[in-house]
Amino acid sequence: MDWVVGAPLPTGGPDRTGGSAGGGSAAGAPAPLRLGGAAALVEMIEAGACAMKLHEDWGTTPA
């Protein structure tokens, strides 16, 4: 996972920035993981994801 999210992407020059978004949901995780963050989501953030994509298809419900 670290290589997939943390791999540098060619951006065309030093004046541009790029980032990777992680995706998933902790909705199906046991209660302690939902409260403290699911291990997979934490792993994506630690690997360098600059955003998280949460979607209803992955178990995220609208507010």
Image (spheres, grey):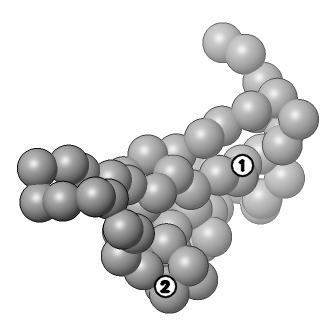
Residue 17 seen from this side? yes
Furthest toward the bottom, the residue is: 3
Quarter of the image that includes the C terminus: top right
Q: Which residue is mark 1?
A: 25
View extreme (top): residue: 63
Mark carried by residue 50: none
Whether residue 6 sits left or right of residue 26 in the image: it is left
The N terminus - image quarter = bottom right
Q: Is residue 3 above or below residue 39?
A: below
Q: Which mark is residue 2?
A: 2
- Identify which residue, 38 or 2, lies in the foreground: 2
Q: Residue at coordinates 52% horizontally, 45% vertically from top-left?
A: 52
Q: Nearer the viewer, residue 7 or 15?
A: 15
Residue 5, horizontal then vertical, whole percent: 49, 72
Three-letter code, disc 1: Ser
> Could you say which is closer to the camera, residue 45 or residue 26?
45
**At x 82% / y 29%, what residue is drawn?**
56
Q: Amino acid at mark 2?
A: Asp
Horizontal arrangement in the rendering, residue 57 relative to residue 1 (left or right): right
Of the image marks 1 and 2, the number of the one nearer the N terminus: 2
Please identify the quarter of the rendering in which residue 27 is found. Answer: top right
Residue 31's spot in the image, x, y percent?
71, 54
Of the two numbered discs 1 and 2 in the rendering, the one whose residue sits closer to the viewer: 2
